[in-house]
Amino acid sequence: MLISAPAQASEAKADGGKVFGWVEKATIEPWGAMVKAKLDSGALTSSMHAENIETFERDDEEWVRFDVEVEDEATGDQDEKSFERPLYRDLTVSGAGGRDKRPVVLMTLCMGGERYEEQFSLRDRDGMNYPVLLGRRTIQSLGLLDVRKTFQTTPNCSDDAPLHRYEDKEYSDKIGAAS
């Protein structure tokens, strides 16, 4: 039996499930800068705006140092922070412009009162409308996506807000496969 998207969204809300719009506000944790995040079902891996990306070695492991400069949606101010994270993996992206190799790190976002640790490829998204793009791997752990709506949740996370750790999640084997 087929159920329409509006019926599924209403059912999810009635069951206490979360429904997200195609654009949501999120905070980059533990920094707290609020950004607009586009939920993009056409992308597999999430992406975050980063500049001055450089890899380095720490304790015989590869790490990534990068700067994130965004307009904080809560204040309207330009805000910048430097991060250092272990390199999770390298990602090669192919598109109309050719092939691009990007580092991937684990970062945490707050959306809808819960924190989500996810893989993010780092890329200079300065010319893009959204500094954060959430791909299918992230979307499947959030809840339902209603592409007709925006801003369905508020990023309000306290220190004790639930944290969905990347290593604890189960992802569908078919999330990146064509049917």
Image (cartoon, rainbow, N blue to C red):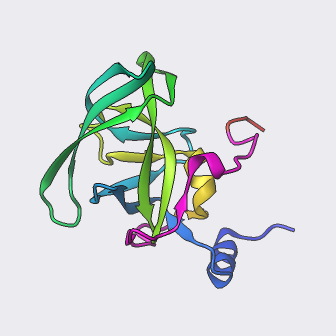
User: For this rendering, which residue is in front, 160 or 13?
Assistant: 160
The quarter of the image holding the N terminus is bottom right
In front: 29, or 26? 29
Instruction: Please identify the quadrant where the C terminus is shown.
Output: top right
Please tell me whether residue 159 belongs to the stretch shown in magenta: yes
Farthest residue toward the top? Answer: 98
Which residue is located at x 45 percent, y 35 percent? 105
- How many marks can you see? 0
Does residue 49 show up magenta in the picture? Answer: no
**Residue 173 picture location, percent across and down:** 76, 40
**Within the image, what quadrant is residue 30 found in?**
bottom left
Q: Left or right: 64 with respect to 136?
A: left
Q: Quadrant of residue 177?
A: top right
Query: In front here: 115 or 57?
Result: 57
Question: x and y percent of residue 153 in the render?
Answer: 44, 72
Q: Is residue 77 above or below residue 125?
A: below
**Residue occupying image coordinates x 46% and y 31%:** 104
Q: Residue at x 66, y 51 (%)?
A: 169
Where residue 170 appears, as percent x and y from the top left, is 71, 49
163 to 68, vertically: above or below: below
Asked whether 179 or 152 is in front, the reply is: 152
Q: Residue furthest left?
A: 77
- 176 left or right of 153 in image: right
Return the x and y of residue 74 as percentages of the image width and height.
Answer: 22, 67
Q: Which residues are magenta?
A: 148-175
Vertical placement of 171 versus 127: above or below? Answer: below
Which residue is at 38% across, 71% downward? 158
Give the residue furthest to the front. 59
